[in-house]
Amino acid sequence: MTDMQDRIETQLPGQPPNLRTTLAIIRTIEAEKRTYLAELRTGIGILTIPLSLMTILIATSNYYDVNAVLSFIVALVIGIAVLVIVGGYLVFRSLVRIRQNERLRNETCLDTECIIRDYAAADLD
């Protein structure tokens, strides 16, 4: 269980919590989602760098002898591989966390319709 799930379970003991607590939980979940989307954007940006480097390498291949600059090309290919791994890791991790975040939001029923229904029912009691 995540820290957010623990906080939600302790704050929702069967009766609806106050509106401020519910809205604070929603804001926290949405802030986490924005963070994961920024991480996704960064990962995609890092994945585009190797593509650009390979394009430059291929476009300028007529101007150099591969045997003369083989050590530079090997280092560049290793750097490209590292960037692909890092970018792929960031994209994968952010997508997994966004999915977990959405699942948590759906499990706790923290959307506007649910809040209105819960608090309308609480006002009638």
Image (cartoon, rainbow, N blue to C red):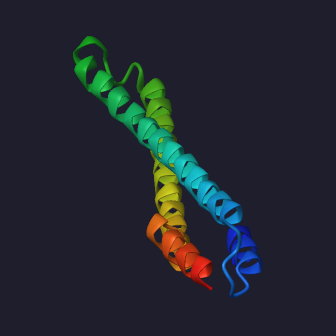
Q: Position of residue 125 (x, y in %)?
A: 62, 86
Q: How many marks?
A: 0
Q: Where is residue 85 in the image (x, y as percent from the top left)?
A: 49, 49
Q: Is residue 112 toward the left or the right of residue 29 in the image? A: left
> Viewer-proximal residue, 99 or 62?
99
Q: Where is residue 72 in the image (x, y as percent from the top left)?
A: 47, 24
User: Which residue is the extreme one toward the front?
Assistant: 124
In this view, 30 is above or below 57: below
Q: Is residue 80 toward the left or the right of residue 33 in the image? A: left
In this view, 95 is above or below 116: above
At 23% from the left and 20% from the top, the residue drawn is 59
> Viewer-proximal residue, 87 or 111?
111
At 27% from the left and 17% from the top, the residue drawn is 60
Residue 81: tell me if it is visible.
no
Quarter assignment of residue 9: bottom right
User: Which quarter of the rendered picture does the N terminus lie within?
Assistant: bottom right
At 62% from the left and 60% from the top, the residue drawn is 23
> Viewer-proximal residue, 23 or 69?
23
At 39% from the left and 19% from the top, the residue drawn is 68
Quarter assignment of residue 104: bottom right
